[in-house]
Amino acid sequence: MFLAKQHAERQRGYLRIRRRLFLFIPGIVASWWGGGLLAAAKTRGIDPSSWLYRFLGGPWPFIIIGTVLVLVWFAFGKAAAKAGREREEFERIITH
């Protein structure tokens, strides 16, 4: 029963993190919209005519970060499902 409870707690933890991942989006949008990446590039001395500066000024960093957040969201969902399956397996072993 101890292992089953541990897996249930782990599953709840993964789902809790998964629900809170998208709280990063407002900060990411505000940083991108406000030109935070461009300001950071300027302070690092990146030339405004370089490809990196133009890349940071476009929508690509926002799209890449959004894609990574979605992939991490799916990964935490899969980890939670795996912990749930393991918990069910332990409970089935215990009851039989």
Image (cartoon, rainbow, N blue to C red):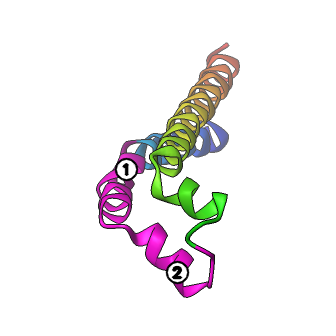
Instruction: Point out the image quarter for the N terminus.
Output: top right
Span colored in magenta: 19-47
Q: Residue at x 60, y 39 (%)?
A: 7
Question: What secondary structure prevails in the magenta region?
Answer: helix
Residue 29 part of the magenta-drawn span? yes
Q: Is residue 96 above or below residue 31?
A: above
Q: Is residue 11 above or below residue 81?
A: below
Q: Residue at x 33, y 55 (%)?
A: 29
Label whose residue precedes the other's in the sequence (2 or 1): 1
Residue 3 part of the magenta-drawn span? no
Q: Secondary structure at mark 2?
A: helix
Instruction: Name the amino acid type tagged 2.
Output: Lys
Kindly identify which residue carries mark 2: 42
Q: Nearer the viewer, residue 66 or 78?
A: 66
Identify the residue at the far front of this view: 49
Q: Nearer the viewer, residue 6 or 63?
A: 63
Q: Secondary structure at mark 1?
A: helix
Badge 1: residue crowd in 10 Å (few <14, some 14–19, many ≥20): few
Q: Position of residue 95 (x, y in %)?
A: 61, 18
Kindly identify which residue carries mark 1: 20
